[in-house]
Image (cartoon, rainbow, N blue to C red):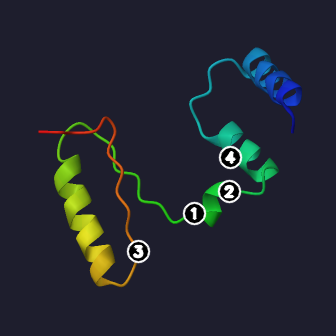
Amino acid sequence: MNYEEARNYIAHIQGNLGSDYSLKEVTRLAEYMDRPDKKLQIVHIAGTNGKGSVLAYVSTVLKEAGYKVGRYISPTIFS
């Protein structure tokens, strides 16, 4: 899929479907791209409170289980 095809696809789904907050179209697009989300092993932690603690717990458990663990926090916290 090139840039123009992607723009046409997005315009098509916006014009014909209206507001759809499901993951149906995102999943369909991912399937078209051979499901890159299924090829990655990622834990995405989101929410209002407790992300740092959950990140510490999950990364420690995964490291102890033998997984390679990288952490990325955005925005970066300096203090």
Q: Tag 1's secondary structure?
A: loop
Query: As shown in the figure, which amino acid type bears the numbered disc 1?
Result: Leu
Residue underneath mark 3? 68
Tell me how far mark 2 sits from mark 1, CA to CA: 7 Å
User: Would residue 10 be found to the left or right of residue 74 on screen?
Assistant: right
Local packing at callout 4 (Cα closer than 10 Å; few below 14, some 14-19, many 20+) is few
Local packing at callout 3 (Cα closer than 10 Å; few below 14, some 14-19, many 20+) is few
Kindly identify which numbered label has been placed on residue 40.
Answer: 1
Residue underneath mark 4? 27
Q: Tag 4's secondary structure?
A: helix
Query: As shown in the figure, which amino acid type bears the numbered disc 4?
Result: Thr
Residue underneath mark 2? 36
Q: Position of residue 30 (x, y in %)?
A: 71, 48
Tell me how far mark 1 sits from mark 3, CA to CA: 13 Å
Query: As shown in the figure, which amino acid type bears the numbered disc 3?
Result: Lys
User: Would residue 33 be found to the left or right of residue 43 on screen?
Assistant: right
First reached walking from the N terminus: tag 2 or tag 3: 2
Q: Position of residue 8 (x, y in %)?
A: 85, 22
Tell me how far mark 2 sits from mark 4, CA to CA: 11 Å
Tell me how far mark 4 sits from mark 1, CA to CA: 15 Å
Tell me how far mark 2 sits from mark 3, CA to CA: 20 Å
Residue depicted at 21% across the width and 61% down the height? 56
User: Would residue 65 be found to the left or right of residue 78 on screen?
Assistant: right
